[in-house]
């Protein structure tokens, strides 16, 4: 069978000294998707990283009395630590200060200049430093940046421009003939109606008013503008225009760019136009997700609703944080976040539905059969309904994940655990034990353990630590994802390992 390949990316992040839970959302989602694709047998490449150049970095470094490189090095070490604590398994963490990336960006810039798609001119316009974006008067909202609401200032400088307008018609045609390219559909409509059809202007792609950036190789007075620099990471990471482009030939075009809704236009207008100019295929899909918000507003340290995500991980565990992000927020829409909501999800789904189920099942096995997994030919009237639901879940999860409906995929897995709890109430194993109906009791407990085993395997992409711990407690070697549509694979005549409640109920801590 031909090896299936899958390339998924997150945007590279501006090095923020204050990470909050919203920063984690994109990468946790991408990690779950990458892990799931690996389970399905894909050869997966998962890229994340940091966008480290620009005027605002230069200014912050000056304020901190360090070099820009020293400033970003410290923050990137912190970012990598956070990703590690969130159990993020990426293939590469790219930094735009990496030598190979700098070399590739310079080659791309020169290639487009030689082709005539980049030319020198003069830029006059309105610029927002925090967003590193240029705006026209008509795009401003109350005279301020439409993205962040901050002041803009007029700049006038010599600059190189990319002929973005040249690719307008071709871009519209591509988007309209490839409906899957921009998702969800609301983002596609926004890009076409609000940005492309009103008319694309040529794009300023170099600056001379600061030096912290990639120098234009043939004109050192200029540094490459952030969006050409940052967006090129998706191909520079794979070795494009390098001596070894094996990964590029293998994985490009990307299967999925996951980005926040605020940068969809850069990834669906500027990036595809650059790729067209380079005669490269476009990514198969750009998915613009929503924001995590608190009380209708963004998470912000200045608003007093900020916490380092590591505090949540310390208090509730990494899988509780991952579960909330993946389950609570409809992928593509804004989602509310609060510690109270996190605890409610934790108690209802993790502690009650999964933790209690696993603990009581293993406790009954220990009490009635000394912890030995046993099986019999006896049947109950409730077996077939349980088995049918469990064995059909794999197909449901795959269907949801194909549509990037992550909360729905997770909920279908948890339906196994909810159904198991109902099965316990239906079969009343404690009564079977009193009646000394050992054969039916064996069947009930085996069916529960087998259902839990399958559910745990399906959970692996989303809650890897929880999945691993459940399977360890079951002491099973049957952990193949491919067999999760089969029932009865769990070994018998083996003894379960030591166990304890995986999730304990939590109360909201006093602030």
Image (cartoon, rainbow, N blue to C red):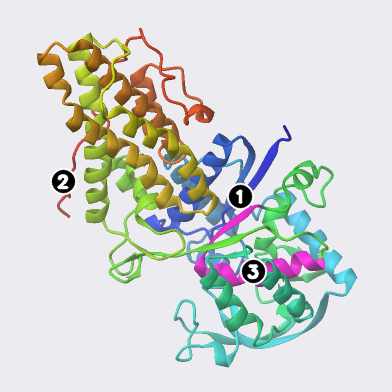
The answer, for residue 184, to whether it is visible in the render is: yes
**Is residue 30 rendered to the left or right of residue 119?**
left
Circle 3 crowding by C-alpha within 10 Å: few under 14, some 14–19, many from 20: many
Tell me residue 328's x, y (percent): 34, 54
Residue located beneath label 2 in the image: 507
Q: Nearer the viewer, residue 142 or 500?
A: 500
Residue located beneath label 3 in the image: 268
Give the residues in magenta: 255-277
Q: Quadrant of the C terminus?
A: bottom left
Tell whether label 1 touches label 2 (CB within 8 Å).
Answer: no
In terms of secondary structure, what is the magenta stretch mainly? helix
Tell me residue 187's x, y (percent): 54, 71
Q: Is residue 308 above or below residue 173?
A: above
**N-term-proximal mark, 3 vs 1:** 1
Give the distance between the C-alpha atoms of the residues marked 3 and 1, in whole angstroms. Answer: 16 Å
Q: Is-magenta flag for residue 282?
A: no
**N-term-proximal mark, 2 vs 1:** 1
Q: Is residue 62 above or below residue 510?
A: below
Circle 2 crowding by C-alpha within 10 Å: few under 14, some 14–19, many from 20: few
Residue located beneath label 1 in the image: 8
Tell whether label 1 touches label 3 (CB within 8 Å).
Answer: no
Residue at the left extreme?
A: 434
Circle 1 crowding by C-alpha within 10 Å: few under 14, some 14–19, many from 20: many
User: Residue visible at 22% across and 17% down?
Assistant: 441
Residue 419 is drawn in which quadrant?
A: top left
Residue at the front extreme?
A: 381
């Amino acid at each position: 069978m031909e090896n299936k390949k899958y390339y998924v990316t997150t945007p590279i992040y501006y090095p923020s000294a204050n990470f909050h839970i919203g920063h984690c959302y994109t990468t946790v989602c991408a990690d779950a998707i990458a892990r799931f694709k690996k389970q399905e047998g894909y050869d997966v490449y998962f890229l994340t990283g940091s966008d480290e150049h620009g005027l605002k970095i230069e200014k912050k470094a000056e304020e901190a009395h360090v070099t820009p490189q020293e400033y970003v090095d410290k923050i990137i070490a912190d970012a990598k630590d956070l990703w590690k604590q969130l159990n993020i398994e990426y293939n590469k963490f790219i930094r735009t200060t990496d030598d190979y990336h700098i070399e590739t960006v310079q080659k791309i810039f020169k290639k487009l200049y030689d082709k005539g798609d980049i030319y020198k001119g003069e830029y006059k316009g309105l610029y927002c430093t925090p967003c590193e974006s240029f705006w026209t008067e008509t795009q401003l909202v109350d005279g301020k940046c439409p993205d962040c609401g901050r002041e803009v200032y007029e700049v006038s400088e010599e600059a190189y421009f990319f002929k973005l307008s040249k690719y307008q018609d071709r871009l519209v045609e591509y988007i309209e003939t490839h409906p899957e390219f921009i998702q969800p559909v609301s983002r596609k409509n926004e890009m076409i109606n609000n940005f492309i059809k009103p008319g694309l202007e040529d794009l300023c792609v170099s600056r001379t008013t600061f030096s912290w950036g990639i120098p234009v190789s043939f004109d050192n007075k200029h540094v490459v503008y952030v969006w050409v620099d940052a967006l090129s990471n998706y191909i520079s990471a794979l070795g494009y225009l390098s001596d070894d482009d094996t990964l590029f030939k293998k994985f490009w075009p990307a299967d999925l760019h996951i980005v926040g809704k605020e940068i969809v236009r850069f990834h669906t207008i500027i990036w595809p136009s650059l790729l067209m100019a380079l005669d490269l295929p476009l990514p198969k899909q750009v998915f613009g997700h929503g924001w995590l918000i608190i009380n209708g507003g963004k998470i912000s340290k200045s608003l007093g609703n900020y916490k380092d995500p590591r505090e949540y991980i310390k208090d509730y565990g990494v899988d509780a944080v991952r579960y909330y992000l993946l389950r609570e927020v409809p992928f593509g829409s804004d989602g509310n976040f609060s510690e109270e909501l996190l605890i409610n999800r934790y108690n209802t789904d993790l502690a009650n539905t999964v933790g209690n189920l696993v603990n009581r099942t293993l406790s009954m096995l220990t009490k009635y059969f000394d912890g030995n997994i046993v099986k019999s030919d006896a049947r109950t009237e409730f077996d077939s309904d349980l088995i049918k639901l469990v064995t059909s879940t794999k197909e449901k999860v795959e269907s949801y994940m194909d549509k990037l409906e992550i909360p729905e995929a997770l909920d279908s897995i948890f339906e196994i655990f909810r159904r198991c709890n109902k099965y316990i109430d239906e079969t009343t194993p404690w009564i079977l034990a009193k009646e000394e109906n050992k054969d039916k009791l064996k069947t009930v407990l085996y069916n529960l353990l087998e259902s839990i085993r399958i559910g745990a395997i399906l959970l692996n992409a989303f809650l890897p630590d929880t999945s691993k711990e459940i399977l360890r407690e079951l002491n099973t070697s049957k952990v193949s994802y491919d067999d999760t549509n089969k029932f009865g694979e769990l070994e018998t005549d083996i003894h379960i390992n030591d166990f304890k409640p995986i999730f304990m109920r939590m109360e909201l801590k006093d602030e």
